[in-house]
Structure formats: structure tokens, C-alpha cells
Image (spheres, rainbow, N blue to C red):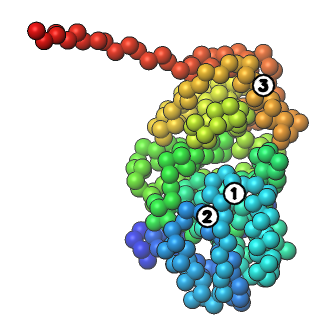
């Protein structure tokens, strides 16, 4: 990573992510959003028309600020509203946005700017990546999760209720990660998702990356947005490197923890953030790897400790092992015919492997027993002397 964080006007943090035929430069510093117009003009060449995709819930003042910055760089702009949250990650929502852009006369030679979280920026990436030969697209992430995912591994879209079935190509030419925007837009659930992604990505990439996340968890305070952005950019780099690897096993390693995470999400819904489900999936597959692949138990305990340090506590659920196994099979079958688990031999060395049902039931039984909701203890009743 190049550059250093500092006060407004200092050199920004810089990370270039190259993956799937796309190169995205992430810049992070206080006030970096003020470069939105100039960055897009540099990517387009000759400013003409720009679509401003705004996630629902973004303040009118912030949208007006970005609109003004684009206008000052020579763009005529128009706004398009994007649904907030998972509603944005559907093919129907993306097609609605595409219809709006086409109706306004946007061409692949024009520009797209998107402001919002992970879901909004993933939708914008799909639209830009499929707009003619690919339109120039600039993102203004409002969460750490969006900073991590949008550049190289945006979320796929859903179709007919199946999440993640429609491929979303990485298409952003640049992301401007401003701590002020992240502070405004970040919620606790999104923060938990980002923490889980930091741990997962570092664990499957390399011992150096894993040690860096451990150090970050020990030294960066939760309110140090710039420090967290620095780690988010490192995570984006790790994910981009793995996603663009020529080794299928490296690309698949980013799925570690997802089979159980998706199963829990399908049964528990929004009761917990997805980051909590992913953390449980990481714990689960690390224990499978300890039994089946010889993963050092000290590494398993180090992973547990890191997840706990980030506040990714265990979920509480009353599910049965058979119910969870069925959910894992059902959710996996929606996306692939091959049911595999990522079983690391060591940090940074993971391979996808099938696991027999009897082994899964053994581990799921232990999991369900440990996560069973505890009965509330009876409070002692203090006798009260009746007044005479």
C-alpha cells in the first residue's frame, strides 16, 4: 500500500486492485470525496453526462455535494435512487436502474458515480460492467464492508429469490474512501460484516496478512476510522490477489466459512449480522481442518481469539444437527453441484475438499450443543416483611 494517512490535504492511502480484466484504484483520506469530479473526468476523458446512483437513506446534503463536484468538472448529472440493503442485490433492481440510465441517454462513454454501502456499490458495479463496453464508474463507499468488496469481489445479484446466482463483474475504476462518509453510513451490523471479512481473507491469504489483522485488532481503536480503512484496503488487496489467482484452489479459498454461514442465515434470517454467521463458519471449518487436514490446534485457537477480539461472538440457536446439515445442502445446491469445504493445512494454505455427512453430523452435533440457548436463571426472591 502506498501513501500515508493524515490530516486533510495529506497524501491519501492508495491501493490498486487488478482482477478480472478491471483495475480499480482505492484512495482513502479525509476529504478525498472532493476529488469525485476530477477523478471521473480523468477516467472518462471528455465530461458530458454522469449518472449519480444514490442509496436510499443517504442525506440530501451529501448527494447535493457530490452533484456539485461533478457539475464543477463539466458533467451534466441526474440522480437515480438505489434501494437500501439486500433489496439492491437483485437482478430486478439492477434492470430498473439500467432502464433509467438508458432512458436518460447514458452511453458507455459517459460516467457513473455511486454512493452507498456494499449492496448499492455491487449493483452499480454490475450496471457499469454491463453497460456497452463498460462505462467508467466511481464509487463513494459509506461502509468498511463496501471498501473491502467493491473493488475486486462485489456481491453477485439474486434472481428468483436465489441470492448470489447472477455474476457481478468488478467494474469500478476508482473508489474514494472518505472516513467522514464511512462514519456517517456505518452501522454495527455492517461493521461486524467487515471484521469477519478481514479475518477470513487474511486467514486464507498468508501468515503475514493474518498477523497484520491480529496486530490491527490489538492497536486500532473502534473509533479510529482511518486506521480501520487502512486495514480494509489491505483486505481488499488480499481478496483481489486471491480472486485473480490462476489457481482454482486460491480463488475458492474465499468461500471459507460460507457453507455454514449461508445455512445459519437461511434459518435465523436477520437475527444476527451475516458477519456473525461467517465467523461461525470459519470456526466450524477450522475444526474440520484440524480433524481432516492436520491444521495445528494452536492456529484454531488463534482464529477463535481473533474473532472474539473483534466482537464476533458465538450465535445462539436452537437448531438440530440434521436441520443444519439439510440447510447446508440446500443452500449450496442453489449455487453449485459440488459441495466442498475449505480445509486449511495452515494459514494461507487451504484446499477445497468434500466432507462425508457422518463427519459433518459429528461436528454439527457439537456445534448445536455449544450454541443451544441457555435457560435464564431464576432470580432470587427476597422476602418482604409486610407492614403491620
Considering only order in the chain, which callout, 1 or 3, is on the residue closer to the N terminus? 1
Q: In what quadrant of the picture does the C terminus appear?
A: top left
Query: Which mark lies nearer to you, 2 or 3?
Result: 2
Number of residues whose C-alpha sits closer than 10 Å to that of mark 3, classed few (under 14), some (14–19) or many (20 or more) = few
Number of residues whose C-alpha sits closer than 10 Å to that of mark 2, classed few (under 14), some (14–19) or many (20 or more) = many
Rendering coords of residue 101 (x, y %): 76, 75
Q: Which mark is residue 326?
A: 3
Residue 105 shows in this picture? yes
Q: Which mark is residue 55?
A: 2
Rendering coords of residue 274 (x, y %): 61, 41
Q: Which mark is residue 88?
A: 1
Q: In what quadrant of the picture does the N terminus appear?
A: bottom right
The reply to whether discs 1 and 2 touch (Cβ–Cβ < 8 Å) is yes
> Residue drawn at (79%, 69%), measured in percent from left and top?
98
For the residue pair 213 and 129, the one nearer the viewer reads as: 129
Number of residues whose C-alpha sits closer than 10 Å to that of mark 1, classed few (under 14), some (14–19) or many (20 or more) = many
How far is mark 2 from mark 3, CA to CA? 36 Å
> Residue drawn at (70%, 15%), measured in percent from left and top?
362
Q: Left or right of 66: which side holds 127? A: right
Quadrant assignment, res 48: bottom right
Considering only order in the chain, which callout, 2 or 1, is on the residue closer to the N terminus? 2
Quadrant assignment, res 380: top left
**Which residue reaches farthest left?**
388
Amino acid at each position: 500500500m502506498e501513501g500515508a494517512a493524515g490530516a486533510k490535504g495529506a497524501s491519501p492511502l492508495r491501493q490498486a486492485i487488478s482482477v478480472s480484466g478491471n483495475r480499480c484504484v482505492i484512495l482513502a483520506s479525509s476529504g478525498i470525496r472532493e476529488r469525485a469530479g476530477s477523478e471521473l473526468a480523468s477516467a472518462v476523458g471528455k465530461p458530458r453526462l454522469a449518472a449519480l446512483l444514490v442509496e436510499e437513506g443517504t442525506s440530501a446534503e451529501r448527494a447535493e455535494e457530490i452533484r456539485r463536484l461533478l457539475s464543477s468538472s463539466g458533467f451534466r448529472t441526474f440522480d437515480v435512487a438505489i434501494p437500501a440493503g439486500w433489496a439492491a442485490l437483485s437482478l430486478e433492481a439492477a434492470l430498473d436502474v439500467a432502464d433509467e440510465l438508458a432512458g436518460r441517454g447514458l452511453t458507455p462513454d459517459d460516467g457513473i458515480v455511486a454512493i452507498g454501502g456494499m449492496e448499492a456499490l455491487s449493483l452499480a458495479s454490475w450496471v457499469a460492467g454491463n453497460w456497452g463496453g463498460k462505462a467508467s464508474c466511481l464509487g463513494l463507499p459509506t461502509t468498511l464492508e463496501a471498501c473491502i468488496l467493491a473493488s475486486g469481489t462485489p456481491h453477485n445479484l439474486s434472481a428468483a429469490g436465489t441470492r448470489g446466482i447472477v455474476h457481478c463483474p468488478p467494474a469500478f475504476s476508482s473508489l474514494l474512501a472518505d472516513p467522514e462518509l464511512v462514519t456517517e453510513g456505518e452501522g454495527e451490523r455492517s461493521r461486524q460484516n467487515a471484521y469477519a471479512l478481514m479475518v477470513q481473507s487474511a486467514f486464507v491469504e498468508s501468515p503475514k496478512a493474518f498477523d497484520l489483522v491480529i496486530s490491527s485488532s490489538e492497536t486500532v481503536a473502534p473509533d479510529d476510522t482511518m486506521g480501520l480503512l487502512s486495514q480494509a484496503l489491505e483486505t481488499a488487496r488480499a481478496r483481489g490477489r486471491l480472486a485473480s489467482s490462476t489457481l482454482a484452489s486460491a480463488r475458492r479459498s474465499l468461500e471459507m466459512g460460507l457453507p455454514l454461514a449461508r445455512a445459519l442465515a437461511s434459518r435465523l434470517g436477520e437475527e444476527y449480522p451475516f458477519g456473525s454467521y461467517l465467523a461461525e463458519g470459519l470456526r466450524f471449518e477450522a475444526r474440520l481442518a484440524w480433524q481432516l487436514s492436520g491444521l495445528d490446534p494452536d492456529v484454531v485457537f488463534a482464529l477463535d481469539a481473533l474473532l472474539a477480539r473483534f466482537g464476533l461472538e458465538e450465535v445462539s440457536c436452537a437448531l438440530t444437527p440434521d436441520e443444519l446439515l439439510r440447510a447446508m445442502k440446500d443452500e449450496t445446491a442453489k449455487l453449485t453441484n459440488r459441495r466442498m469445504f475449505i480445509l486449511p493445512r495452515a494459514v494461507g494454505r487451504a484446499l477445497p475438499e468434500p466432507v462425508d455427512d457422518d463427519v459433518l453430523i459429528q461436528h454439527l452435533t457439537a456445534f448445536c450443543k455449544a450454541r443451544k440457548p441457555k435457560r435464564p436463571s431464576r432470580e432470587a426472591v427476597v422476602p418482604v416483611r409486610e407492614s403491620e
